[in-house]
Image (cartoon, grey):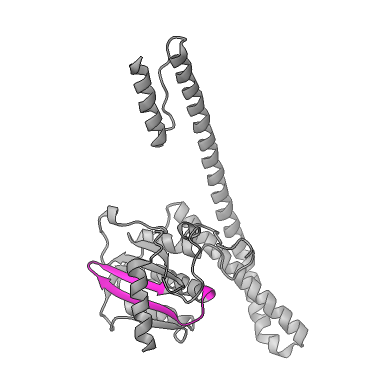
Amino acid sequence: VLRPVRALGRATRRMAAGHLDTRLAVSGSDELAELSRTFNDTAAALEQSVAELRRMEERARRFAADVSHELRTPLAAMTAVTDVLDEESSRLDRVTGEAVRLVSEETARLARLVDDLMEISRFDAGAAELGADDIDLAESVRHTLAARGWLDRVAADLPEPDGLRARVDPRRIDVVVANLVGNALRHGAPPVALRLTAEGGWAVLTVADRGPGIPEADLPHVFERFYKASRARTRSESSGLGLAITAENVRLHGGRVRAANAPGGGAVFTVELPLRPGQPAGTATAGAEHDGTAAEGTERAERAERKDGA
C-alpha cells in the first residue's frame, strides 16, 4: 500500500518542480490506481495548458517585434515631417502652432515606444549583446545627465574623474541611468538624489526621488512590463517598459537592481554592477527586491541628499 503512495508523493514533488511530463505507472483497478489515473489526466491537461500559454506568449512577442519593426519606416517619415513643421511653428497662427506641437510630441512618444518594443524583442530573442568597454563610470553618468538637460535637476554625488572605472556597455549604462532618473523626475519633485560609489568589486548606483513612494503591494512588480502602480493612469510620457528594460540591461551585465521606499518618503532604486565581467552567476540577479525599510540603498541616497543640501 505504501509503495504507490510514495510514488504518488514523488510524482507530485516533480510536478511542483516544473516537470510537467511526469506520469505514474498504473495497474489494477483499486482506489490507488484510480487516483494515479486522475493524477496522470490532471498532469496531461496541465502540460497542455502550459504549452498553449507558452505558444500564445511566443506569438505575442513575435507580433510585438513584427509590428514595431514595420512601424519604424512610416515613423521615420512622420518624424522628418514633424521636424520641418517644428521649424515653421513660430510662423503659424496660435491654434495651428499648438496642433503642430501636439503632433510632434505624440510622434516622438510613439517613436520612443517603438524603440522600447524593439529593445524588449531583442532581449526576448536572446539577441541582446554587450558592447563592453573600459570606461569612467562617473563621466558616463555626467554625460547622460548633461545630454538630457538634467544637471540642474539632479543632486549627483559622483567620484572624481577616473575614480571609478568599469568594463560595461556605455550605451546600456546610459539607458539604465536615463530610465531611473527620468522615472524619478516624473514621480517626484527635483532635485533627484543620485550617488555612485564602489563597494568591493561592485559599482553601486542609487537614485532617490521626493515623490510619494511606491505602494507596498506594487514593489514586487515595478520591473514588470507595462506595469503601472495606478490603474487610473491610462496615459503617461513613459512607455511602461523603461524599468523592465533597465532590469534586463542590468541582468545582461551580471548585476542586480532593486526598488524600495525611503523611511522619510520617496522611492529609491539601487543598481549594483560588477566592475569586471565574470562575477559568480549566483550573485547576480535582476528584479524587484521588496525591502520596506530600504536599508543600505536608502541610507546611501539620503547621505548623498544631505551632503548636497548642506
Q: Is residue 120 above or below residue 270?
A: above
What residue sits 49% from the left and 84% below the top? Answer: 149
Q: Position of residue 215 (x, y in %)?
A: 51, 63
* Closest to the observer, 53 or 227: 227
Quadrant of the drawing holding the C terminus: bottom left
Q: Would you say residue 227 sits in the magenta stretch? A: no
Residue found at x 47% / y 24%: 39
Give the main secondary structure of the magenta stretch: strand
Q: Which residues are magenta?
A: 186-207
In which quadrant will I find the N terminus? top left
Foreground pick, 204 / 301? 301
Picture residue at 60% right of the left edge, 72% below the top: 108
Q: In this view, which residue lies farthest toward the left? A: 200
**Residue 199: within the magenta?**
yes
Q: Which quarter of the figure has residue 49?
A: top right
Find residue 283 and report its image quarter: bottom left
In the image, residue 288 sits, relative to residue 154, either above or below, namely: above
